[in-house]
Each structure stands twice: as C-alpha cells, then as structure tokens.
Amino acid sequence: MKIFFWVLVAANLIFFAVMKSGMLDEAQEPVPVPLHAEQISILNAASSVAEQASAVAPASAPAAPASAASSAPAATSVPVNSCFEWGEFSGAEIGKVVQALQKMHLGKRLSRHEVGHTIGYWVYIPPLKDKAAVTQKVAQIKSLGVSDYFVVQDAGAWMNAISLGVFKTQDAAQSFLEELQAKGVHSAKIGEKSGSKPSVMFELNGLNRDESDRLGALQKDFSDIQLKSVSCH
C-alpha cells in the first residue's frame, strides 16, 4: 500500500512539472502585433464618405459669366478713317457744293480735279509761234490741196493751232490724217476734242465717323450726283 501511495505521489509531481514547463513555454512565445481592426474600419468609412461626396458633386463648376470675368470697362473702338469720291459736278452746282464742303473744314483732306469728256477727235497742226508762222503754214497746206482749215485765235494753250477737221470717231480721224500725209502734210496730228465745260470731281480723304455722317446728309441735297466710298491712299 505504501509503495502504491508513493508511486501516485511521484506521478502527480511529474504531471505538475510537465504542466508547469508547458505554461512557461507558452509565456515565452512572442505576442502577436494587433491589427487594429477598428482603425481599418474607420479608414474604409472615410473612403466611402469621400466617394459618395465625389458622386454627388458636379463634374465641373459652371463657367463664370463673361461680365464677371473682368471688371474693367470695354475699350471704345476708334472709327476707321474713310475716303470718298463725289461727282461729277458742273455749272452752278460746283459753286454750291464748294460752299457746303467749306463748312466741314477738311483742309488738305479735300481736293478737286477737272474731268474732261471727249466729244470727238480732231486733226490739227500744233500751235505756231506767231501769226507770221501761221500765215506761212496756211500758204503751204493750201498749195498741197488743203482748203478746209480753221486757225485757233483764242488766248490759251491752243492759240495759233490750225484745225483741219473734227470727227466723232478716232478711226475717221485716222483715215483723214492718212489722206493729208499722202498729200504731203506731215505736221498734222490727232487729238481728243473735249467739252468746253469740263465737270469737277471732289476727293475727300481721312473722314472720321462724324464727318462721314455729315457728308452723307449733305449728299441728299445733290441726290443725282454719285457719292462713292473708295480706298484710301
């Protein structure tokens, strides 16, 4: 009985020793690092909130109206200068339009030039230096068979010229000139015959908007005369 008792005591000691050894080993094992699951949950919730906010927000903010883009006032555009031709004027109309244009005070921006209209062609001998030369030339062309002529006696650039004929077309004048040359009259020439009262054309340059409007109003008094815009030089 005693032997059995001591064997049981020894067995219990060994069992407790083994159990104590196992508990020590478990105490020496490294403690695992916690994953902080509660933090992961918080981050996921924040990400979800951000995604929902992004889905609700519009894709892009509306563009600001043009008036709000800049508070500076728009620059006033400077009117472009304009140029015109006005005419043709003749007779008493010339004096009237000159008086009206003078009130616009355009100075050198206003100019005028005469416009001669061809009414035919004439065959002539250019002006001679004096009456003696005219008498000598007349005697010469008479001797060559020319009996129809007219000596220009009016003062001016054509004084002492000898007109041999006036024609409506240049071809008719050319044919007559060739006849004279065949007779030996080699000093004759062809020239345009203009009207005795040339008309006048006005040129107006560099007009601003106000001056252009004034000119348009003035043109109503001469409605039958053409006013046209031209390129400025």
Image (cartoon, helix red, strand yellow):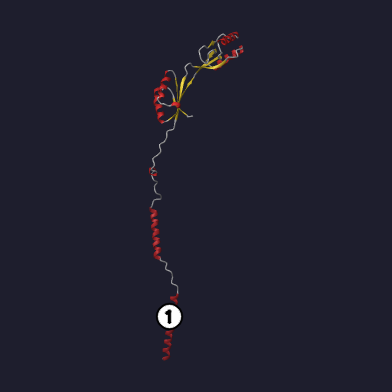
- Name the residue nearer the viewer: 11 or 205: 205
The answer to whether residue 107 is above or below residue 58 is above
Indicate the position of residue 215 as horizontal and vertical percent values.
41, 26
Indicate the position of residue 98 as horizontal and vertical percent values.
42, 22
Indicate the position of residue 33 as horizontal and vertical percent values.
43, 69
- Name the residue nearer the viewer: 162 or 26: 162
Q: Quadrant of residue 176?
A: top right
Label 1 secondary element: helix
Crowd class of label 1 (few under 14; some 14 to 19; many from 20; radius 10 Å):
few
Name the residue located 45 percent from the left edge and 75 percent from the top edge: 28
The answer to whether residue 207 is above or below residue 35 is above
Indicate the position of residue 64 as horizontal and vertical percent values.
39, 45
Q: Mark 1: which amino acid?
A: Lys
The residue sitting at the bottom extreme is 1
Tell me the quarter of the image containing the N terminus: bottom left
Find disc 1 in the rendering and name its residue: 20
Q: Is residue 146 left or right of residue 25?
A: right
